[in-house]
Amino acid sequence: MSRTVYVNGDYLPEEDAKISIFDRSFLMADGVYEVTSVLGGKIIDFAGHLVRLERSLNELDMQKPEAFDDLLDIHRELVRLNDIDEGMIYLQVSRGSSGDRDFAYPSADVKPTLVLFTQSKPGLADSPAAKTGLKIISIEDQRWGRRDIKTVQLLYPSMGKMMAKAAGCDDAWMVEDGAVTEGTSNNAYIVKGNTIITRHLGNEILSGITRAAVLRFAKEAQMKVEERSFTIDEAKSADEAFITSASTFVLPVVELDGAAIGNGTPGPIAARLREIYLEESLKAGV
Ligand code: PDD
């Protein structure tokens, strides 16, 4: 069945939704995005995603779309029109189209392009991977230096996922100067005893909205949190490992570059954090 999507003020059947071939997101990857999850028909962590979107726009001197203040209503309307119970909403803002290709940013009268669409994923909260755990490979981090901005330059993360697939694994963690930055589309964590270790924020990683919530819940549950770099060797000898993102929530990692993490099965801390995250998110969804 065709989805109803949103393009620049209009709700349209997906086959009728069109943007210009000169759109800068198409020609220059000059666009930013957010992925927000839906659980029980409610939008999860919306406020956090909106704050990060505004920051991404500011960092790139990109205009806010006119409908910026209506984004919650647009998300809700798409959930309603597409009858989404569990899934995701993808939002993209690009610098728009000046009607030609030019490296320079267009003048201020060129309006940004705003596109949103839903992805229905029944069973998202009940993912089998939560029980089996993920197998991860490590790859060199070859992305640009402003990974804190959520841009649509996703070719290297796509390549990373394909490298993982070719190796019979689920995903990849990226490594720079000997330290893990993050997963191809998620933040990376290891656990030692009662301590959760994840890379500190900076230009090298995306400040995950799920990361912020999970670290808050971990502290509230009296777990210790260390925000610092860690190496692949340290990860291999950890008791547990896991990832977080809006589309996976918390998922355990059971294997890294062929080595079992802990006893090679999902660990209790990741399981507990997943449970708390899902429980609290369902309560707080809007
Ligand atoms: N990715 N790091 C990277 C590189 C990401 O692409 C993502 C999210 C995250 C986690 O951020 P959050 O918790 O706010 O989802 C970390 C989304 C899900 C995607 O590209 O589909």
Image (cartoon, rainbow, N blue to C red):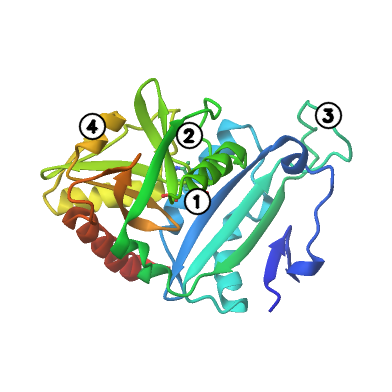
Name the residue beneath numbered marker 2: 148
Which residue is at the far right?
A: 99
Side of 147 relative to 45 (left or right): right
Side of 184 relative to 6 (left or right): left
- The amino acid type found where label 1 is placed reads Leu
The CA span between labels 4 and 1 is: 34 Å
Q: Residue at x 41, y 58 (%)?
A: 248
Q: Tell us which disc is closer to us: 4 or 2.
A: 4
Few, some or many residues within 10 Å of mark 3 (<14, 14–19, 20+): few
- The amino acid type found where label 3 is placed reads Asp
Which mark is first along the chain, 1 or 2?
1
- The amino acid type found where label 2 is placed reads Asp
Which mark is first along the chain, 2 or 3?
3
Residue placed most toward the observer, 65 or 156:
156
Badge 2 marks a residue whose secondary structure is loop
Q: Residue at x 85, y 39 (%)?
A: 98
The CA span between labels 2 and 1 is: 15 Å
- Which mark, residue 234? 4
